[in-house]
Image (cartoon, coloured by chain):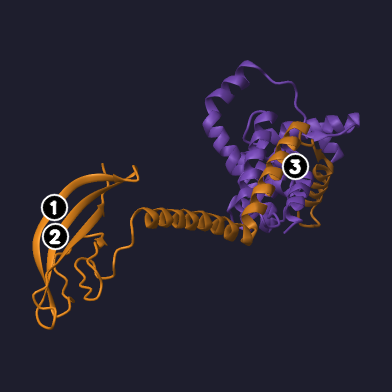
Amino acid sequence: MDDCPAAWRDLFRTHGGALVLYARQWLPDRASAEDAVQEGLVRCWKRQPGQVPDVALVYVAVRTAALDLLKSRRRRLAREERVARPEAEHWWHDDDLVRKERAAAIQTALEHLPIEQREALVLRIWGGLSIAETARVLAANPNTVAGRCRQALVSLAALLPEECHERV
Amino acid sequence: MSESDSPTDDALDRLAAECRSLRPVAPSAALTARITACLDDREASSLRAAAPWAKVTWFAERLAWAAGGAVVAAGIMSAVVPRAPQQAGIVALPDAPPVATVATAPVVEAPTAPAEWVDESVGWSDEGIALIDGALPARVLRHFVLERPVAGPDRGIVRPREDVFVVPVAIR
């Protein structure tokens, strides 16, 4: 029981970046995505304060919070996105210049994927969830989730620049 | 992604591995601080709520306050209003001198009066509302009674008695 808050902190330490990346798939800027992560994580913690966190449930809570935030701020967020084009935001951290370029290309390609494929891929690749856990988060059949992930990778490969293809 | 011999699957696996090697940008320090603060706050409140003795203590404390209040109120009431006799109203005491009994509610006849004495009601007097000790409002009623023995050596004796009824009232 006493270790549970520490477990929640560990979860945030381990999955914080992926959670923000996941929320970012719906929200137009990083600040809003962080708001959604905070809202989702705290909401989930309130629901099961004495328990070891269920990672899949935390992702579900963050997804719900992101969609709620999107609904409540849709008009303002759209205006802000239109008026102030944010500085190029990097989803991944990399010091290596070549890898940074490659990461930027993957980010651009990912942004063009349908949201169903994108969220499945983010949960599987960067969230580290299994197919079953991803299916729980998305409330979908595991086979459907596996299909979406595969399709997302196929689309991603097709969208990546030619020079990137050669690397793949 | 599943392993496969087909080049496409192999390429997809390599792409997945490459994607996996990209580390998402860590949350900002502000978000980390906000979440830590929320968790600490919730931790403190959940520990309070989770302790089973906390609820018992909470209930016992309030019960003690309520009981204390009731005892004080009962003490004030017993100090201000003398305790009524078990048989409210007229109580015949053959061997005792005439006394004034005080009751909380007027009862005209006492069904348990001794057979050898009878009460003759002379009259009632309503003295209206009075403040007992200047604080407790009460209505004061007086009942005048004559006690006469039916038989025995005391036959012919008449004992006057006055019953005083102090009825607490609430002024609204």
Q: Are there few (<14), some (14-19), or many (20+) residues within 10 Å of tag 3?
A: many
Query: Would you name the residue on which mark 2 appears?
Result: B144
Residue B131 vs B147, above or below: the answer is: above
Q: CA distance from mark 3 to mark 1?
A: 86 Å
Which chain shows up in purple? Answer: A
Checking the image for residue A16, the label placed there is 3
Residue A96 picture quarter: top right
Query: Would you name the residue on which mark 1 appears?
Result: B125
Labels 3 and 1 share a subunit: no
Is A33 displayed left or right of B30 in the figure? left
Is A127 displayed left or right of B118 in the figure? right
The answer to whether one can see residue A96 in this image is: yes
> Is there a contact, CB below 8 Å, between mark 2 and mark 1?
yes
Residue at x 84%, y 29% (from the top left corner): A101
The answer to whether one can see residue B106 in this image is: no
Residue B107 vs B137, above or below: the answer is: below
